[in-house]
Image (spheres, grey):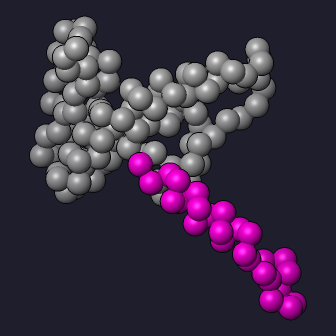
Amino acid sequence: KGIHSVAIVFIHSYVFPEHEKIVAAVAKSMACFTEISMSHEVMAMVKMVPRGQTACAAAYLTPKITEYLAGFTRGFDEGLMTNVRLDFMKSDGGLTPVNDFGGHQAILSGPAGGVVGYAKTSYRPSPGNEGA
């Protein structure tokens, strides 16, 4: 029981992340947090509110995503993870390696995957433009 995740957000951390790093070091030294999410790492952008919301989503969801991925990869044959690249779709439709996949990237990954899949399966090149 208790709080196991923390999101750290400072107004100007997108340019000067040192204060977030100091607070993260203090949080880590407390040895009670399984997830420490710093806004400058999660989303380096000027606007604090969206950056803070994303940091909170990462702090909240990443432990569950990590737990799921550990169970998912545990089912693979020994050595498979070293010989095969395993990527997951992010909310923006891009791919990221399994060890870089966080909760904030997973929120819209299903809908993004649907859009990418639809685009790939429904694309029909026009005559004379088959190479596109």
Split into 4 quadrants, where in the image is the N terminus? top left
48 w.r.t. 39: above or below: below
Name which quarter of the figure residue 108 lies in. bottom left
Q: Is any atom of residue 40 visible in this view?
A: no
Observer able to see residue 13: yes
What residue is at 15 percent from the left and 30 percent from the top?
19
Left or right of residue 49, residue 83 in this image: right
Q: Nearer the viewer, residue 113 or 126?
A: 113
- Residue 74 lies, in percent from the top left, at 64, 18
The residue located at (27%, 53%) in the rendering is 45
Q: Residue 2, image x and y in percent?
A: 19, 17
Q: Nearer the viewer, residue 114 or 8?
A: 114
Q: Residue furthest left?
A: 11
Q: Residue furthest front?
A: 1
- Residue 115 spot, x, y in % from top left: 58, 66
Q: Is residue 22 left or right of residue 43?
A: left
Which percent across, then down, holds residue 12?
15, 46
Which quarter of the rendering shows the C terminus?
bottom right
Q: Residue at x 59, y 62 (%)?
A: 114
Q: Which residues are magenta?
A: 107-132
128 magenta-colored: yes
